[in-house]
Amino acid sequence: EIVLTQSPGTLSLSPGERATLSCRASQSVSSNYLAWYQQKPGQAPRLLIYGASSRATGIPDSFSGSGSGTDFTLTISRLEPEDFAVYYCQQYGSSPFTFGGGTKVEIK
Amino acid sequence: EVQLVESGGGLVQPGRSLRLSCTASGFTFGDYTMSWVRQAPGKGLEWVGFMRSKANGGTTEYAASVKGRFTISRDDSKSIAYLQMNSLKTEDTAVYYCTRGRRYFDYWGQGTLVTVSS
């Protein structure tokens, strides 16, 4: 089973700042099959990125994904008030599909 | 508009069974693999399993934590996916989300809470 470790656990930033979230896998993720989700309190997760760098439908270009192998990054270029949430990475290159523990992006 | 609506959650005693339903609309249900993901209170996300479309064999895969106890099925004529949960344990307490997709999940339901407690 591939273990995904997200860091930092919490990121305290101000609106307008850049956020950089990390997701590290315990072994190489096949074909860079890595997705990112955003979850706000009381809501279901929302797909942001798949294939490590492809934005899902309707996702603004302020969100970008990068990385390969075992190291992946989600970048939010300029934080909007609605971007403060918890972010999860997920690998789907090998079963069982696994999620990281999440990074909370909070308002500083 | 794609919609997934879960139902069937509630309070159940350990060792008992429960069946969740996921009613889909806004897309051709039979063309898609449907998956379930759960989230224990205050915790992260855990993949539960999926069922492929009939065109892709209708086969299933499950997480080790639920294999042998949970069964995913589907009724394409009604656009409904099911999660049959048997021999429930307290650690199965979670919000259960129905999702579209086999690998990554592009649409999610609002979730239904299952509480396993005596």
Image: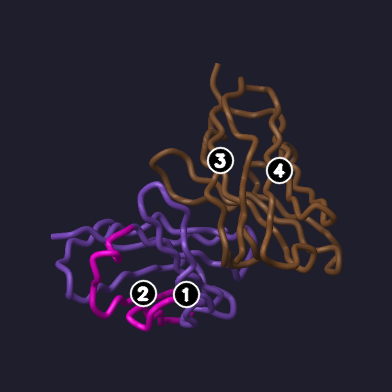
Which residue matches tag 3? B112
Q: Amino acid at mark 3?
A: Thr
Q: Is residue A67 magenta?
A: yes
| Residue at (43% x, 76% y) in the render | A59
Q: Few, some or many C-alpha atoms within 10 Å of disc 3 (few <14, some 14-19, many ≥20)?
A: many
Chain shown in brown = B
> In the rendered structure, which amino acid carries the disc numbered 1?
Ile
Tell me, for residue A97, which label it has, or none.
none
Mark in the foreground, 4 or 2? 4
For badge 2, the amino acid type reads Leu
Q: Label 3 is found on which chain of the structure? A: B
x%, y% of residue A76?
30, 76
Q: Which residue is mark 1?
A: A49
Q: Disc 4: which chain? A: B
Which residue range is magenta in the image?
A59-85
- Using the numbered discs, state the Cα–Cα distance from disc 1 to disc 3 in whole angstroms: 25 Å
